[in-house]
């Protein structure tokens, strides 16, 4: 998976202990639910003006951060659902531990760098569609998060190491589903944190 703005800059070389698949999926589930709680507590009470306030020229509002995540979710969630369904049909069995690919690991590490420390240019097709967005962006985000939680549960029933997800920009780039799932959650963490900084008066 490649997400807009991600860099392939390699992380420091280090050996990583094997992660149990159940622990991996448990952590992603907990992280995603924490994001839902943040959106419900901090963003749902906002007025339309607060939701759409931009901290500066070229900067995104809270609503635009959510809209960007909704665009990405709309592209990848149906693909993941289809691939999981195919794996279930083949009676795929879960693996004990998680395997990650080199490219996926690099993308994830790059995505963990806060947007405040390293701003990136998002391709136009993934950028928010308008400067003033309706409150439905919050509901769409929550619905997609629920979808992803369902997919994380379904992922426990198959070998997610063997599933490859084609990239929507570069179809020949196919990452492991393990990397794909982690990237979606880390990407959401990055932009929810960005939206929180907007509320705090930062950029």
Image (tube, helix red, strand yellow):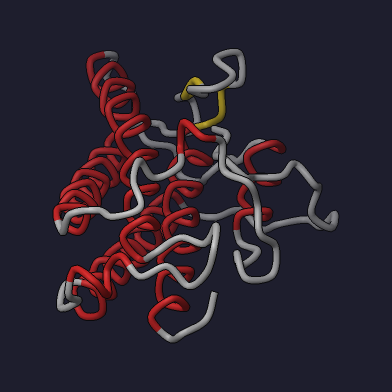
Can you give x and y, in whole percent of width and height, for residue 57 in the image? 54, 62
Residue found 68% across the figure and 53% down from its top: 110
Residue found 28% across the figure and 16% down from its top: 86
Count the numbered circles shown. 0
Q: Residue 24's image quarter? A: bottom left
Q: Quadrant of the N terminus?
A: top right
Can you give x and y, in whole percent of width and height, for residue 79 in the image? 33, 24
Q: Nearer the viewer, residue 93 or 181?
A: 181
Residue found 69% across the figure and 70% down from its top: 117
Can you give x and y, in whole percent of width and height, for residue 67 in the image? 32, 49
Q: Nearer the viewer, residue 189 or 18?
A: 189
Q: Nearer the viewer, residue 133 or 8?
A: 133
Q: Residue 128's image quarter? A: top left
Instruction: Tell me: residue 69, above or below residue 203.
Output: above
Q: Quadrant of the C terminus?
A: bottom right
Q: Nearer the viewer, residue 140 or 164?
A: 140
In the image, farthest residue toward the bottom: 200
Can you give x and y, in whole percent of width and height, for residue 32 in the image? 32, 61
Instruction: Tell me: residue 96, above or below residue 32.
Output: above
In the image, farthest residue toward the front: 57
> Is 202 on the left-hand or right-hand side of 107?
left
In the image, farthest residue toward the right: 13
Q: Residue 4's image quarter? A: top right
Residue found 60% across the figure and 13% down from its top: 172
Instruction: Tell me: residue 164, above or below residue 29.
Output: above
């Amino acid at each position: 998976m490649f997400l807009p703005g991600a860099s392939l800059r390699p992380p420091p070389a280090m050996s990583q202990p094997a992660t149990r698949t159940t622990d991996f999926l448990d952590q992603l589930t907990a992280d995603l639910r924490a994001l839902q709680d943040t959106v419900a507590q901090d963003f749902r009470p906002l007025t339309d003006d607060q939701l759409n306030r931009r901290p500066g020229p070229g900067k995104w509002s809270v609503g635009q951060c959510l809209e960007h995540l909704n665009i990405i979710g709309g592209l990848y969630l149906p693909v993941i659902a289809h691939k999981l369904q195919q794996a279930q049909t083949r009676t795929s069995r879960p693996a004990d531990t998680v395997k990650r690919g080199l490219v996926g690991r690099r993308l994830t590490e790059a995505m963990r760098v806060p947007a405040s420390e390293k701003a990136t240019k998002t391709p136009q097709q993934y950028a928010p569609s308008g400067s003033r967005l309706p409150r439905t962006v919050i509901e769409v985000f929550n619905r997609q998060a629920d979808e992803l939680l369902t997919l994380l549960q379904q992922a426990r029933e198959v070998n997610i190491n063997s599933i490859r997800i084609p990239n929507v920009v570069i179809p020949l780039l196919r990452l492991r589903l393990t990397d794909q799932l982690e990237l979606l959650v880390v990407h959401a963490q990055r932009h929810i944190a960005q939206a929180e900084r907007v509320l705090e008066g930062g950029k």
